[in-house]
Image (cartoon, rainbow, N blue to C red):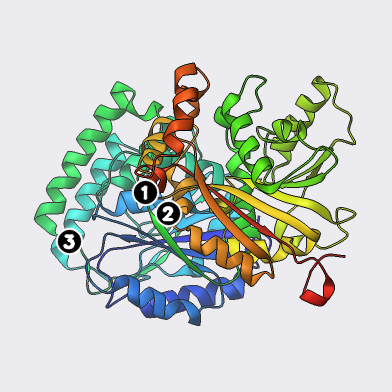
Amino acid sequence: MNAGSTSFSLIVPAYNEAVRIGEPLVEMGAWLHAHCDRSEIIVVDDGSDDETCQVVRQTAPRLPVPLRLVRYQPNRGKGYALKVGFAAAAGDVLAFTDCDLSTSLDALPEFLGALERGADVAIGSRKILEATITRHQPILRETLGRIFTWIVRHVIADVSDATCGLKAFRRDAGVDLFAHSRIDDWSFDAEILRIARKRSYLITEIPVRWEDRDGTKVHLLRDGVSALIGIARILRNDRTGVYDQPLAIGPTTEESWGEPGLLTRRRSRRFYDSRQHEHLQAGEEDLYARKLVGRLVESLGIGPTDRVLELGAGFGRFTFPLLARCASVVAVDLSAVALEELVRVRDERAIPKTRIEPHCLDLDALEAGTLGERFDFVVGFFLLHHLADFQRSIATVAPLLSAGGRMGFLEPNRRNPLFLAQVAACRDMSWAEERGMFLLSEKGVLDAYRDAGLEQTTSERCGFFPPQIFNRVGFARRLEGRLEVSRLLYPLLPFLLLTARARLSPESGSSGA
């Protein structure tokens, strides 16, 4: 594991940092560009009420590496900002640093080397041999910091410097630790180290070069008391088993600059690979999936002799009902884990391999001919809001349609408030994975169709009850049809069905054969 070959996510929490964040971001981008082939910077805005986000937006185009800005309200604290950042990050190595770069990034190759040699967590230290402090903190702050470190070392975790602002993690360790953290304020460092010890993660300390910078948000009395309370909470949480259960994060919004490339594709792949996702598994009696497939099939006009390309097929929840309405399905997904399950179910049901062909591919890399002849139909279920750039993806796959072929996607309607309840209630869903629904709009998809050269764009809304009710309550299934035609409820129905058609001939600009 070295900086050149490892994908790297650098997470930067920020609260009211408009004055300080611009130039350090430029420095971070330059360092990552020089030392890492694949990297990203994630700035997490912790509910700022100044111009922090605007400064980030102005700075991002100057960077030679991708930058993502993740935002939420209200202010929660540095610990929560990092929880959000680690949930969003895509790298093999996840690190965080303070936005003022008080800790130099020059030691990062040593952090990576420590992780390569078997450490799970590498933390910077200003208190071990070879560490350098070029400008000390005021004496009172430094003294209180030493007291806090002494307490942490004796009751939380045996490290020399718990609060240094540069730490790096193997991906699995970092995601696990922050998913189980509870403390949002300055005590989060100690909490993460305590959970790491509890889970037997190997922690290594790395000497760093550190310089005190003006503009700190630390308030000595307030944060000193809060830190002591935090230590008490950590010990109590550990004793009562609180850290045995992960804690979901709330909704966020995201903006991005630069080519996301492999990092975003890895993050999308991990959507399936990280856990079972029981709500997406193929089921024999999934009436909910059958209905949604039926609506898309009827809207597009898919028939029993048609060849269909399904994007984001996953475990096959919608693939098998779709197959019952067409001749064959080519199922494309980024996740080999999900497609292996799809193949298992296909073979278990004795379905000929020629009727369902799985392909583990990145849809943004698809070209005409990659999957054989062009398709009569291209479809996707709840896919677009997971993509980094759905407009680009639609433009990429549009040439795969035959002349007059049709494309259709079923997506969540962001105006429906029940999606928030579903994400909160479903243990296999998370805000980090579903936040794209708040960025995807009906108009945005239809515009993307037209920009890709498609025509006859249409949209409609459908659905009402979640699958937990629809699959189990016959009355709900009968009632849903009536609710779908209610003029009052129609704008809030949970699903958008968005379709378009490829032009009929090359003379009219068709991308078909």
- Closer to the camera, 287 or 17? 287
Can residue 453 be seen by looking at this rendering? Answer: yes
What residue type is disc 1 on?
Pro
- Label 1: element kind: loop
Can residue 276 be seen by looking at this rendering? Answer: no
Cα gap from disc 2 to disc 1, whole angstroms: 9 Å
Which comes before the other along the chain, label 2 or label 1?
1
Q: Residue 251 carries which label?
A: 1
Residue appearing at x 49%, y 58% in the figure: 442
Graded by Cα atoms within 10 Å as few (under 14), some (14 to 19) or many (20 or more), the crowding at tag 3 reads some
Question: Mark 1 against mark 3, which lies toward the viewer?
Answer: 1
Q: Are marks 2 and 3 in contact (CB under 8 Å)?
A: no
Graded by Cα atoms within 10 Å as few (under 14), some (14 to 19) or many (20 or more), the crowding at tag 1 reads some
Q: Which residue lies furthest to the left in this view?
A: 221
Above or below, 192 against 21 in this view is: above
* Residue hosting label 2: 438
Where residue 265 appears, x then y in whole percent? 64, 55
Q: Quadrant of the C terminus?
A: bottom right
* Residue hosting label 3: 141
Q: Quadrant of the N terminus?
A: bottom right
Residue appearing at x 29%, y 23% in the figure: 239
- Closer to the camera, 264 or 363? 363
Residue appearing at x 33%, y 27% in the figure: 242
Residue appearing at x 35%, y 49% in the figure: 160
Horizontally, is 287 left or right of 163 in the view? Answer: right
